[in-house]
Amino acid sequence: MKQSSTPRVCRDNSFTSNQPQKARLRIVLFLLAIPLLLALSLLFGPSGIGLPDMNSPAGGAILSLRYSRLLMGMMTGAALSASGVVFQALLRNPLAEPYVLGVSGGAGLGATISILAGSSVILSLSLPVVAFVSAVLTLMVVYGIARQGSSGQPSVYSLILSGVIVSSICSSIIMFMVSTASVEGLHNVIWWMLGSLQPVSTGQQLLSLGLIVSALFGIWLLSPRLNALALGREMAHYQGVHADLIIVSGLLCATLLAATAVSLSGMIGFVGLIVPHVMRALFGPDNRRLVPLSALGGGTFLVLCDAVARTLMAPVEIPVGVVTALAGGPFFLIILQRRMKQAWIA
């Protein structure tokens, strides 16, 4: 008899086989709410609340710009949220997100080099490529440092500590480059670092969309194995899961998502932390559902944050990264406080 390649623990996963009726109803309501929230975001902008006058060229241009920002927000938010789901699953740490492992810092350093060197102006497609290569190299450095002194695979805590250190070094290098840059380069990098959903070129959007969809599909294929890894490496091994292969594949897909998001919209923090937690609380920890729902939720969350950012102090626009940081900072502290009470960290 032919044996299925899917681990048994994944096929018999109680998260889905005994799915409560209420959870299904929540999913339906969530999917119905998304288009309504996205349509609502189109009504907000520096020019006022409501749809612009479609009979005027200016009104058409304003609505087109809002559509473009909606697309940028959906791509960036989906990439950051799905990346956070994978990092939290692989590290088995609820505080893990692209910034913790230094992935976003490495991608930011590559993107900064590309912007200051002018290559992003000459060839816009170079920005996501340089960001991804820089993020992968950073991840390799983090992994190499974490393995020092360990006989086998690095521990979760050594990975996180190495990520924080490498991320700090990348940030310091970025600050040095910014401090020695020209006025024009300084303005471009600072505005990009604050996080913005200003539309990029069509070529970069199409390339980024292709990379994000490919990485999301790869993560979705890995999601049953991620469920098995939640039980620990040893249990996953007994269920037929090649833990090392799944971890490396998952890290590469998550790194690709984070690097693409950074190259698109700059350093936008906490989306990869807030959204996976909220989605997990609403729909459960099964990664087969959590990955696509978090992608949709992350995109919608960032679009709504952008609507707030461009409306709150209109006509002055607040960088969307500031809005997500103001929402994510307290959220991070609440999670940390709860974990400390449970003696998760000492």
Image (cartoon, grey):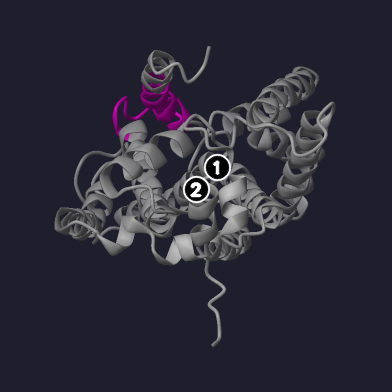
Crowd tier of the residue under label 1, counting other residues whose Cα lies within 10 Å: few below 14, some 14–19, many 20 or above: many
Left or right, residue 25 beside residue 145? left
Residue 129: x and y in percent read: 74, 53
Whether residue 323 appears in magenta in the rendering, the answer is yes
Q: Is residue 87 above or below residue 324?
A: below
Most common SS among magenta residues? helix
The residue under label 1 is: 265
Query: Which stretch appears magenta?
Result: 311-332
Q: Which mark is residue 23?
A: none
Residue at horizontal 21%, vertical 54%? 23
Residue farthest along the bottom direction in this orientation: 1
Q: Nearer the viewer, residue 90 or 323?
A: 90
Let me know if residue 341 appears in the view.
yes
Q: Quadrant of the N terminus?
A: bottom right
The residue under label 2 is: 76
Crowd tier of the residue under label 2, counting other residues whose Cα lies within 10 Å: few below 14, some 14–19, many 20 or above: many
Q: Secondary structure at mark 2?
A: helix
**Cβ–Cβ under 8 Å for marks 1 and 2:** yes
Q: Nearer the viewer, mark 1 or mark 2?
A: 2
Left or right, residue 160 beside residue 172? left
Residue 344: x and y in percent read: 47, 20
Q: Nearer the viewer, residue 66 or 290?
A: 290
Image quarter for residue 20? bottom left
Q: Nearer the viewer, residue 54 or 126?
A: 126
Q: Is residue 229 above or below residue 161?
A: below
The amino acid sitting under disc 2 is: Thr
Residue 117: x and y in percent read: 82, 39
Image quarter for residue 289? bottom left
Residue at horizontal 26%, vertical 55%? 34
The amino acid sitting under disc 1 is: Ser
